[in-house]
Amino acid sequence: MTEGTRPLEDSIRTDFHDAMSYGRYLDLDRILGAQHPQSDPEHHDELLFIIQHQTSELWLKLILHELRESRRLLDVDDLGKALKGLARVKTALRTLIEQWSVLSTLTPREYAEFRGSLGSSSGFQSFQYRAVEFILGNKNARLLDVFTSEPAAHAMLTDLLAEPTLYDAFLHALARAGYAIPDDVLERDVATPWVFRQDLVPVFTRIYESPDTPWVLYQACEDLVDVEDSVQMWRFRHLRTVQRTIGFKTGTGGSSGVGFLQRALDLTFFPELYAVRTEIGR
């Protein structure tokens, strides 16, 4: 044994000519070969920018996967498993939030040196982020126009636009559990964005204040609030990262930049779950 090295155990496999290896299982050749800086000559920091956004898309893929499953589980009244999925969503969102810290190591001068290579590409064009917003309730049919050049993305978003949101599924579950969810809420046009319903606040007041509330319903309300808080924190960190990197320049995709991102903070998914806090204990 060479001094300073860890001996390889005899049972450890070293020949993968005819067996599944780590790299093949994860398709690492394609993943690690998917970074294609556009700057010429290649700027050192463009790789960071690309990896930041590629890894974000992978986490968004997982988040959407879990939100869809949680919605399905709510539809069959398996709230315990649905909340397990939301717990995973919350953890993934925390990872996405923290990733902005890595991108924030990119200075304004460094970014300016390769920003032109992005052309008209922009994070606004992330169809997976838009899908997450759709399933959480921020529906906007006009945004489908952004994806007409990407048929698969357009089809997926068109389907999600017409499907109930996670919140719709939760409200239906509450109705089946005996809570007085208004009929027009249960029969609403799910392709439209959610708007605040004052008549739902007493329903959530009962859930929060009654000692007879099943714990899983109380926890579901809190988990939904956690999800929204995390999305809002992600939006805020995005805004602050953009502001510290490009100031108030126009976005590469044509938006006003920071001002456009600021307005996203006014969008809410579950407004009644915040409004109920004012009523509790009155």
Image (cartoon, grey):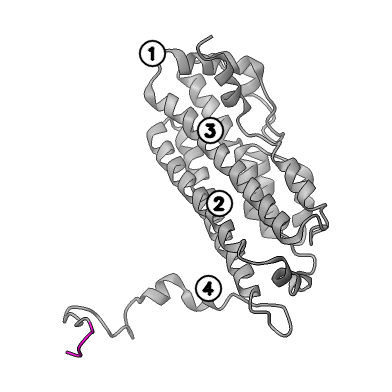
Disc on the earlier residue, 1 or 4 = 4
As measured in the structure, the alpha-carbon distance from the residue carrying label 3 to the one carrying label 1 is 20 Å
From this viewpoint, is residue 182 visible? no
Characterize the local packing of mark 3: few (<14), some (14-19) or many (20 or more) Cα atoms within 10 angstroms.
some
Q: Identify the secondary structure beneath mark 3.
A: helix
Which residue type carries mark 1?
Answer: Pro
Q: Name the outermost residue toward the top.
A: 282
Which of the marked residues, 4 or 3, is nearer the chain's N terminus?
4
Q: Secondary structure under badge 4? A: helix
For mark 3, what is the residue?
225
Please tell me how crowded label 1 is: few (under 14), some (14-19), or many (20+) other residues with Cα within 10 Å: few
Q: Which residue is the site of mark 2?
A: 97
Q: Mark 4 points at which residue?
A: 31
How many numbered circles are shown? 4
Q: Is residue 79 left or right of residue 59?
A: left
Point out residue 211 in the picture as x, y percentages from the top left corner. Answer: 38, 13
The quarter of the rendered structure image containing the N terminus is bottom left
- The image position of residue 264, as x and y in percent, is 72, 42
Image quarter of residue 17: bottom left
Q: Distance between the residues labelled 1 and 2?
A: 35 Å
Q: Nearer the viewer, residue 53 or 136?
A: 53
User: Dividing the picture into quarters, in which one does residue 164 lie?
Assistant: top right
| Mark 2 or mark 3: whose residue is earlier in sequence | 2
Q: Is residue 39 above or below residue 218?
A: below
Q: Which of marks 4 and 2 is in front?
A: 2
In the image, what residue type sits under mark 2? Answer: Ile
Q: Nearer the viewer, mark 1 or mark 4?
A: 1
Q: Is 113 displayed left or right of 167 in the figure?
A: right
Q: How far apart are marks 1 and 4 (CA)?
A: 51 Å
Residue found at x 38% / y 34%? 80
